[in-house]
Every structure is written in structure tokens, then in C-alpha cells.
Amino acid sequence: MHETEIQVRFCETDLLGHVNNNNFFIYMEDARIRFFNDLKLVDEDWNFILASTKCDFLKQVYYGQHLVIKSGVVKIGNASFHLEQDMYEKTTGELVAKGISVIVQFDFEEQVSQPMSAEMKKQLEAYQLAAN
């Protein structure tokens, strides 16, 4: 799995003192972008869009905590893939949130999905999780 570490900032908390739910989507995006860059799926031309995203919040998270986001591919299609992102509190190892996103390669000029190359699929397969 691909791993990204995030430190929770004070501005990401709400009046209840825990991380506001919106920020989990930002953490997922940050990890997703690092995943794309590390796999060299993107260059100066960004060619992916987010078609769907979901997050289940399992535990409260607070200012100063460190999260480890583990990202893995659960499905590879012709023009899209599904990315699972589990978020763990670094010190305890507790699972605090689970996210899933559907990412589509997109041709912005034609405004249609675009098939991924065999090389892209091969790169994604290296991070493919075993079926449940």
C-alpha cells in the first residue's frame, strides 16, 4: 500500500475540538495526489477527475495527532480505478476513517473519459489490494 502521513492542524478542528468531517476529504485528496505523483501517473497535464468519493468516520481525531493514510487500488477498469484509503492514528494504529474514491482518466478537450494505457494499469496493479 502507498502511505502518506498527515499532521492535524489546529485550523482543521471545529467547536467540538475534533477534526471537522470536511477535512478527511482533504486528507484523502492530499494522499491521492501524492499517490499519483509517486506512481508518475500525471505530469504537467493533469488527466484525472474524481467521479465519486465516500468516507466513513470511525473515531474522533484531534489537533496535533498524526494520521497515516494507506492507499490501495481495489478495482481497475478501462478508464477508471477505485482507490481505497484507510486512515490510521499513527501512535495507536487505530483505524479512524475509511474512504473510497472512483478516479477517471479524462480528456478535457473532448470532455469524455479516456482509456488508461497498459503502462498506467501496470503501475496501478502494483498497488492492487487482494479481493475481500
Image (spheres, rainbow, N blue to C red):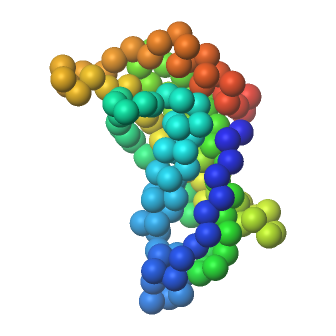
Q: Position of residue 16 (x, y in %)?
A: 50, 88
Q: Nearer the viewer, residue 132 or 48?
A: 48
Q: Position of residue 117 (x, y in %)?
A: 47, 12
What residue appears at the point 59 percent right and 37 percent down from the top-left corner?
Answer: 38
Q: Position of residue 122 (x, y in %)?
A: 61, 16
Residue 91 lies in quadrant: bottom right
Q: Nearer the viewer, residue 41 or 51?
A: 41
Whether 67 is drawn above or below 41: the answer is below
Q: Nearer the viewer, residue 106 or 77?
A: 106
As drawn, is 124 to the left or to the right of 12? right
Whether 109 is drawn above or below 87: the answer is above
Asked if one can make out residue 131 in the rendered structure from this viewpoint, the answer is no
What residue appears at the point 45 percent right and 36 percent down from the top-left corner?
Answer: 102
Whether 78 is drawn above or below 37: the answer is above
Residue lying furthest front: 44
Q: Position of residue 21 (x, y in %)?
A: 47, 68
Residue 112 lies in quadrant: top left
- Numbered label tally: 0
Whether 115 is drawn above or below 75: the answer is above
Residue lying furthest right: 92
What residue appears at the point 68 percent right and 69 percent down from the top-left corner?
Answer: 66
As drawn, is 131 to the left or to the right of 109? right
Pick the quarter of the image with the C terminus.
top right
Residue lying furthest left: 110
Asked if one can make out residue 38 in the rendered structure from this viewpoint, the answer is yes
Pick the quarter of the image with the N terminus.
top right
What residue appears at the point 47 percent right and 51 percent down from the top-left corner?
Answer: 29
Residue 80 lies in quadrant: top left
